[in-house]
Every structure is written in structure tokens, then in C-alpha cells.
Image (cartoon, helix red, strand yellow):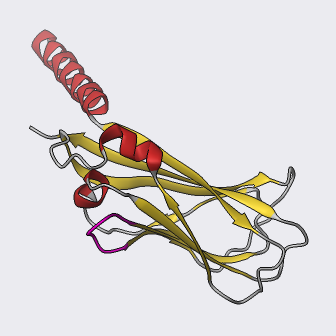
Amino acid sequence: MKNIVLTAMAASAVLVSCGTVQSLVQNTFPYTTNVLVSTGVPADKEVSSTATATNVQTWFGGNNNAKIKDVRISDAKISVASPSGGNLSAFKTVKIYVSSNGTGERLVASRSNISTNSSSLNLDLNDTGFLDEIVKSSGLTVRTVYELKNQTSSDMNIKVALNFSSVPAK
């Protein structure tokens, strides 16, 4: 009986340490940008806003030898940055695309049929495979496409927050 208990404790310690090592070697790096939704944007029409991801580029952009691999989107969220107390009730759909110099555009997150009065919303992640080539290339670009249900009564700034995850390359 004593051997079974000791074996179970040792196995538990190994499993916990493996999870700890995995969380230590897995990298997560953020990207954020603001999208201006002005009062002149018509309802029921797709509108696009593009931003260059300079904060991701400072990590390893343009470095195809960066020691990471298996880059994916791990989280995508939009939230109202201004006006204070604003909500996302005017939005119908949101789509987030990423690309870089020399790569095609990939849809990484979206949400359709938005019906919330909340000031933030987690987007559904699209399984686009690994994004290594896009993230390691120079000029990483994030394009936000949205459609409104109705026009906004005042300008609105929407914060787009993406988290990329990766593991170290050997």
C-alpha cells in the first residue's frame, strides 16, 4: 500500500511539473489597436480598417530565424475604448484578418449576429493553422472588418486585442 501511495505522489509531481514547464516555454504575445467607428458609417455595409502591428514586429517581425514555431491566435476580443459607458449594441458582425508582406490574408477571428449591450465581446477563433510565416515576416497587418446594425450617435473607438501563442523552436 505504501508503494502505491508513493508512486501516485511521484506521478502527480511529474504531471504538475510537466504542466509548469509547458506554461513556462509557451509564449503569448499581445497585439492591440483601436478602430474608429465614426457617426458617418452607414448601417448594413461592411467597413474595413487596417493597422500595422508594430508592437508584434518589435518582438520578432521580419526575422524568419526567430526561435518560435506553431504560432496561433489564442484569444481575440473587442471592447469599447470610448465613449465611456459605450456598448457594442450597434454592431452586427466583426471579422479580424492578419497578413504580412508577401503572404495572403487569413481570417483569424469573427463574430456574426452580435446581440449584446456589453462593452466587450470575445470573438470566435477561426482555425487557420499556424501563422508562423505571417508573424515572422515584416509588415504584419491586422484588418478589422465590421458591419453595423444602425449608425452610431457619436464617434466610437473600439479596441481590438489579439493574443498570439507560440512554442520555442529547436
User: On screen, 130 above or below 45?
Assistant: above
Closer to us: 142 or 90: 142
Closer to the camera in the image, 156 or 2: 156
Q: Is residue 6 left or right of residue 147?
A: left
Residue under the image location 51 percent in, 56 percent down: 76
145 displayed left or right of 166: right
Q: Does 75 sit above or below residue 150?
A: above
Place of residue 136 in the rendered image (x, y in percent of width and height, measured from the top left): 26, 51
Find out whether residue 72 is within the magenta segment.
Answer: no
Outermost residue on the bottom side: it is 44
Q: Main secondary structure of the magenta part?
A: loop
Whether residue 4 sits left or right of residue 51 in the image: it is: left
Which part of the image, by quadrant, shows the C terminus?
A: top left
Q: Which residue is depicted at the point 30% across and 74% down?
A: 104
Residue 47 higher or lower than 159, as above or below: below
Residue lying at 71% horizontally and 64% vertically, measured from the top left = 36
Work out whether residue 58 or residue 70 is closer to the camera in this orientation and state it.
Answer: 58
Which image quadrant is residue 154 in? Answer: bottom right
In this view, the residue farthest toward the top is: 2
* Quarter that holds the N terminus: top left
User: Which quarter of the picture shows residue 141?
Assistant: bottom left
Please report the bounds of the magenta region as a residue range: 99-105
- Camera-side residue: 131 or 66? 66
Please provide percent x and percent y for residue 40: 82, 79
Counting labels gives 0
Kindly indicate the quadrant of the structure image that contains residue 105.
bottom left
x and y percent of residue 17 in the render?
A: 24, 22
Q: Is residue 100 magenta?
A: yes
- Figure check: 50 above or below 159: below
Residue 56, given in percent of the width and then of the height, sits at 41, 45
